[in-house]
Image (cartoon, rainbow, N blue to C red):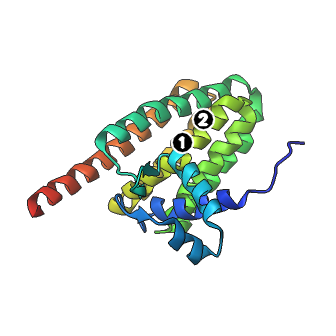
C-alpha cells in the first residue's frame, strides 16, 4: 500500500488560490497580497508564502522582487510550449497503457471513458466537473502505466493545462461536444487495443484545444490594442 501523507496547509492554500486562477476569478496581472490572503483564510503569512512558491512552480503565478506575486499571463509562447510537451506525454501514456495490458485488461479503463461520456451530458455547463473527470481518467491510466516519472510530470502540468481547458470550454460552448467525441473515440480505440488510434485521438484533441486557446488570446490582444 502506498503511503499518502495528508496535504499540508500550504498545499491546501495553493489549491484554493490555484482554482481561483484556473476558473478566471483571478486574472493575469492581479497582485496576490500575502497579508490579505492570510487574513481571508485565517492562516499565517508563512503558509501563504509557501503556497505562493508552489503556485510559481505550477506556472500559475510569477514572483518579482519588491513587487511580489502576480497571476501569470497566458501568452501564445507559453501556451505553445505547454501543449508541445503535454500532448506528447499524454500520447506516451496511452501507448504504454496498451503495451502493458492484455485481452480484456483495458475494460475498466473503457468503462471509465464511457462513464465520462455520460458525465459530459449530465454536467452541462459545470466545466470543472468535466475537466476533473478527464484528469481522473488520466490517474487511472497511471496505475496501469506504472511510470512514476511520467505520472509526476503530467500531474505537475495539471494546473496549467486546466487553466487553458477552462478558458476554451468557457469561450466555446461547442467544446462540450468535442470532449464527448474524444471520450467516445478513446473508448473505441482502447477496445481495439489500437495504440496508434489512441495517441492520434489525443494529439487531435490537444491540437484542437491549442488552437482555441490561441484564438482566444489573439482575440483578447486585438481587443486590448483597439481600446488602448
Secondary structure of the residue carrying numbered label 2? helix
Q: CA distance from mark 2 to mark 1?
A: 7 Å
Does residue 46 sit above or below 217 in this rendering? Answer: below
Horizontal relation, residue 82 to residue 17: left or right? left
From this viewpoint, which residue is outermost toward the right?
Answer: 1
**Residue 4 x, y percent position in the rendering:** 82, 49
Residue at image location 86% in from the left, 42% down from the top: 2
Residue 194 visible, this angle: no
Residue at image location 35% in from the left, 49% down from the top: 74
**Residue 119 x, y percent position in the rendering:** 58, 61
Does residue 204 sit above or below 96 in this rendering? Answer: below
- Determine which residue is flagged by label 1: 157
Residue at image location 37% in from the left, 54% down from the top: 168
- Determine which residue is flagged by label 2: 153
Residue at image location 51% in from the left, 41% down from the top: 185
**Residue 145 x, y percent position in the rendering:** 71, 30
- Please say if the residues under marks 2 and 1 sit with CB atoms less than 8 Å apart: yes
Secondary structure of the residue carrying numbered label 1? helix
Horizontal relation, residue 95 to residue 103: left or right? left
**Residue 183 x, y percent position in the rendering:** 54, 47
Badge 2: residue crowd in 10 Å (few <14, some 14–19, many ≥20)? few
Please name whichever residue, 81 or 70, is drawn nearer the observer in this view of the structure.
70
Screen quadrant of the C terminus: bottom left
Badge 1: residue crowd in 10 Å (few <14, some 14–19, many ≥20)? some
Horizontal relation, residue 123 to residue 65: left or right? right
Horizontal relation, residue 211 to residue 98: left or right? left
Residue 197 visible, this angle: yes
Amino acid at each position: 500500500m502506498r503511503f499518502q501523507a495528508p496535504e499540508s496547509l500550504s498545499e491546501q492554500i495553493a489549491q484554493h488560490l490555484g482554482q481561483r486562477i484556473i476558473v478566471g476569478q483571478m486574472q493575469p496581472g492581479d497582485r496576490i497580497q500575502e497579508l490579505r490572503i492570510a487574513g481571508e483564510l485565517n492562516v499565517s503569512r508563512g503558509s501563504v508564502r509557501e503556497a505562493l512558491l508552489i503556485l510559481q512552480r505550477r506556472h500559475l503565478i510569477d514572483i518579482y522582487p519588491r513587487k511580489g506575486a502576480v497571476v501569470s499571463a497566458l501568452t501564445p509562447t507559453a501556451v505553445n510550449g505547454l501543449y508541445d510537451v503535454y500532448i506528447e506525454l499524454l500520447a506516451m501514456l496511452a501507448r504504454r497503457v496498451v503495451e502493458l495490458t492484455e485481452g480484456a485488461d483495458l475494460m475498466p479503463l473503457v468503462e471509465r471513458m464511457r462513464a465520462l461520456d455520460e458525465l459530459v451530458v449530465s454536467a452541462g455547463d459545470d466545466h470543472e466537473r468535466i475537466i476533473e473527470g478527464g484528469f481522473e481518467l488520466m490517474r487511472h491510466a497511471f496505475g496501469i502505466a506504472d511510470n512514476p516519472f511520467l505520472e509526476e510530470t503530467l500531474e505537475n502540468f495539471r494546473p496549467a493545462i486546466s487553466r487553458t481547458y477552462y478558458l476554451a470550454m468557457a469561450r466555446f460552448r461547442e467544446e462540450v461536444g468535442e470532449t464527448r467525441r474524444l471520450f467516445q473515440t478513446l473508448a473505441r480505440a482502447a477496445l481495439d487495443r489500437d495504440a496508434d488510434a489512441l495517441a492520434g485521438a489525443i494529439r487531435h484533441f490537444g491540437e484542437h484545444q491549442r488552437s482555441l486557446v490561441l484564438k482566444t488570446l489573439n482575440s483578447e490582444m486585438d481587443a486590448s490594442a483597439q481600446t488602448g
